[in-house]
Amino acid sequence: MLRYLIEKEFKQTFRNAFIPKLILVFPFMVLLVFPWAADQEIKNINVTVIDRDHSTLSKRLSEKIGASTYFNLAGYADSNDEGTAILEDGKSDMLLDIQPGFEKNLMNGDEAGVMISANAVNIMKGGLGSGYMSAIVQDFAGEIRAERIRIFGKTELPLIQVISKGCFNVFLDYKVFMIPALIVILMTLLCGFLPALNIVSEKEIGTIEQINVTPVKKFSFILGKLIPYWAIGLFVFTVTLGLAALIYGLIPKGNLLTIYLSVLIYISTVSGLGLVISNYSSTLQQAMFVIFFFMIIFILISGLFTPIASMPQWAQTFTYFNPLRYFIEIMRMTFLKGSGFWDIRQQLAALGICAFVLNGWALISYRKRG
Amino acid sequence: MQKNKFSILNSQFSIIEVEDLTKSFGAFTAVDHISFSVGRGEIFGFLGANGAGKTTAMRMLCGLSKPTSGKGFVAGYDIEKQPETVKKNIGYMSQKFSLYEDLKVWENIRLFAGIYGLDGKLISRKTDETLKKIGLMNEKNALVKELPLGWKQKLAFSVAVFHEPKVVFLDEPTGGVDPITRRQFWEMIYEAAEKGITIFVTTHYMDEAEYCNRISIMVDGRIEALDTPRKLKEQFQANNMDEVFRKLARKARRVENGELRIENDGLGIENGELRVENDGFKL
């Protein structure tokens, strides 16, 4: 019985004018376009320097900043007011105010004053910009001290150097970080939306009536609906995996079998959710709206764009009920860190529970008799 | 009318037995304590104006809708407690065409035959036989959406009887179908009846009503008449079924939301005069 139902779903899916194209275009879009657009690194920040010291060292600092890929030296201002005006006009994103006596203080080992003001309307640009700028200034101070040690053989202050190193994503490449998460989004959209629209469209067209009047088992019917989406999901995942390796050279560090197992559990979770929504909806419009609502919420609190650790406690509690959260963790861990089955067992178990609950619910909420 | 007068409550001869079957939607009672029985191999016409409750009653018998109260047995199984077993023994053709338009003709047959548990080889052999019989062999590989309505209805009927059910329920099978196809359709119905399949059919065509062995006429959720077409004509002193129907249906007084709804198509123009056929304006 199941064979005939699966056959039917596949025929209908591939006869659809739109869905097969979508299945092919989606992975390409997601891997070719989104990693660039979803890049959250900030570059080309315009800086205006107010140099009140006019010394060799203050010039050297300005040049060092201009030489960085993150900053453009937009120009110089003479006073704080002029600088603020430039900032207000939007000609510059940041002000670097070098206080008088900068060189003298630095050479004496006293506190040398530098003030950074950033336009924080774009909070990302402002925050990251100030961060980068302080890093550069500190680096600069370190250089000067190092030179002094070379010349005088000693220094009044202990030399502290902070080295930050990005583990597992050695070059801190945002794209590498984003790709596993983008694959998650892709799986979610394909395997969540398509099932959500499936049963309800049979209701709208009226074909469900002819099915409901047959002795078809609920279990077979629901399984017949799910299996094609699992197959499509695994196929699309394989394509994205290939594309990620080809375009970005990103090859998962973890075991492929573990990754595929996780993908399968995740796909069955979201397709179960889709079917639940489809069962409760009476029109396509309604189903679309509800699945959209869930997807947006799930994506926003998944840790995809913002780290879960920096969310308020109540939002963090919410994320425990979000299958996306677990899958994104699994994907990042297996792809970038090479985590094995044992390392991701908790996330896998959580996903497994979600899958069981949602698919069971899909089975119960499908009613053959009104 | 005495409702139970025609009930043959004898399971040896009857394939459908209904007693006091009722379906309410809130305060509205769509089907109001109907009782009747249908004999094996009978062609049973289920008549009534739009909104009389025919489809609701039929959906209960098919296990698509839960009865509010009353009992019903189809092919010996309780429609309340064993709806899935009932479904194994029946075929159903709904008012609205509901095969898959995006599947081919043979694929629809294969799907439903497969669901009813028929063997794959048997399905493909019988598919050709069936298609030849209904003259759709050339359309075997056509998508169903490309077929004209009359052909679709013939296909839907073939799918409904493909697994040789004990009873087949046909809900207005010939609605919107041309007279020639309608004629062919009734030939198919007779052929199925000869094979021993009981036919339970609703229709609005009174000429079709004459083809039935027995007919019931529903008014406002109740069965107001049930007998052979000949006896009904005698009883209501009518020349044809059309008159019988009009005499009964004009009793309809179903009121919904405080509004009077004229249930039958009672506006007839005769001799250039507009005549309101029912005396329906009593609340």
Image: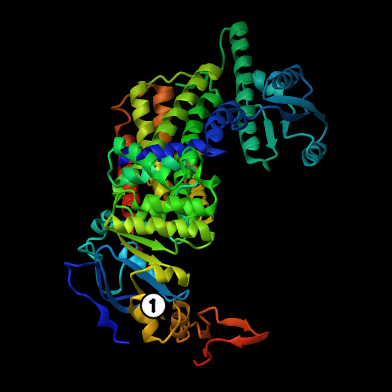
Q: Residue at x 29, y 83 (%)?
A: B3
- Residue A190 in view, yes or no: no
The residue lying furthest to the bottom in this view is: B282
Q: Is B238 situated above or below A133?
A: below
Residue B254: % across, % down: 46, 83
* Quadrant assignment, res A53: top right
Q: Is B41 situated above or below A16?
A: below
Residue at numbered disc 1: B217
Residue B193: % across, % down: 31, 59
Q: Residue at x 45, y 43 (%)?
A: B105
Q: Amino acid at mark 1?
A: Ile
Closest to the observer, B141 or A125: B141
Residue B153: % across, % down: 46, 54
Write down the chain letter for disc 1: B
* Quadrant assignment, res B23: bottom left
Q: Is A193 situated above or below A260?
A: below
- In the rendered structure, the answer to whether residue B71 lies left or right of residue B130 reads left
Q: Residue at x 47, y 55 (%)?
A: B97
Residue A116: % across, % down: 68, 33
The secondary structure type at the circle numbered 1 is strand
* Quadrant assignment, res A117: top right
Q: Is A244 situated above or below A289?
A: above
The quarter of the rendered structure image containing the C terminus of chain A is: bottom left
